[in-house]
Image (cartoon, rainbow, N blue to C red):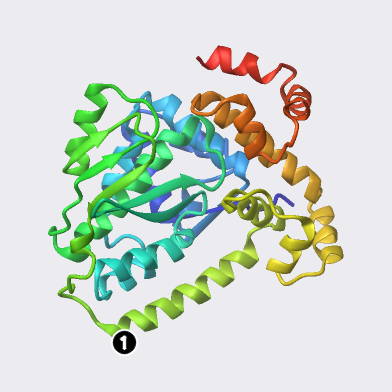
Amino acid sequence: MTSKDVFLPGYYLRQLTELVGNAGVDTVAWLARAGLTPEGLDEAAVGFSLSGFLLLMEDAVRLTGEPALGLLLGSRLLGNTHGVLSYAALNGGSLRQVLGLLEQFLALRITLVAMSQEEQDGMLRVCFRESVPLGKTRRMGLETVVLSIRNILDFITMGACQVREVAFDFAGSDADARLAAEFCKCGVRYGAGWTGFSLPMAQLDMPLRMADPAAFSEAVEICRRELEKMTRQVSMAARVRRLMLEQQNGFPSLQMVARLFHLTPRTLHRRLIEEGTSFKQVLEEVRHRLALEHLKSGRLSIQEIAFLLGYSDVANFRRAFKRWEGVAPSGVRAVSG
């Protein structure tokens, strides 16, 4: 049985299907490539293998020929379209509280992107990064998520949220930035060193008009239960992969991962074997994907990438990469450059 690494709300997929259909694409055939049917999109959540999800998104971008597909989809995901997460946000007491809620429970709506917050010079940066490398669908995915979260803040503040700038860490033309600014209602910068948006710290603790502490607490508890339920549905390999990608200071050991999942190392090993993989194989997959993403971005040297991926010797990284790709890291960088 194919494991489910990715879950997306059926509503999101219905909106994307409509956009794809509007471009003249045969949506039945498009969905069938990922093993889906139009009727299946009526489910509250649709599960995919990671490869099936990426194939569906890549096909959507390729078949429509629409580079702004992520912005078009994000513009349809308004503040009240995110189920219990929207309900909780609407009853939040402040932007600070709601942003904390979204950071904690974003995985209820999408598991492929993680959210974090950084303070800088009187501004709060709300940052987004891939939990799993998205490859050719990276631009579409991040533009969708950034715009949809910005829409939530507009929804709960009744349009009063002062987002100063939206930033993306991938390239875009001046025309791309102008179009994105129309969607985001503020300045947009491509080729930045981060992805997300910034807003004044002074806004964070201003009371929200719709605040209801009791309703907020109840909604948060529902979010917790739903997240626990969803976690049980996701394959163990996907959970391990996500945990590895979320670590900022090296990859955790088998023993540490087992402890975090409240399992014995032997049980974790057995669960992965039952799914046709192993801890070592998942780690190799994560290193491989991250290596490709870092090399193609061009922001880090090969030595820095090797260190970031846990190789004490650059030569070991070069050997591993040649085993994965059949060429040296410098070959991929030269092609990307």
Does residue 218 show up?
Answer: yes
**Farthest residue, direction bottom:** 214
Residue 42 or 195: which is nearer the viewer? Answer: 195
Residue 207 horizontal/vertical position (percent): 18, 74
Q: x, y (%) of residue 131?
A: 54, 48
Tell me the kind of residue under disc 1: Ala
Place of residue 17 in the rendered image (x, y in percent of width and height, measured from the top left): 40, 41
- The residue under the point 78% across, 43% down is 281
Q: Can you see residue 277?
A: no
Q: Position of residue 151 (x, y in %)?
A: 25, 54
Above or below for 323 versus 272: above
Pointer 1 local density, CA inside 10 Å: few below 14, some 14–19, many at least 20: few
The residue located at (75%, 18%) in the rendering is: 326
- Corner quadrant of residue 115: bottom left
Q: Secondary structure at mark 1?
A: helix
On screen, residue 217 versus residue 94, left or right, reads right
Q: Is residue 304 above or below residue 283?
A: above
Q: Is residue 164 above or below residue 298?
A: below
- The residue under the point 22% across, 23% down is 175
Residue named by callout 1:
214
Where residue 27 sits, quadrant-wise, is: top left
Question: Residue at 65% across / 57% down in the picture?
Answer: 239
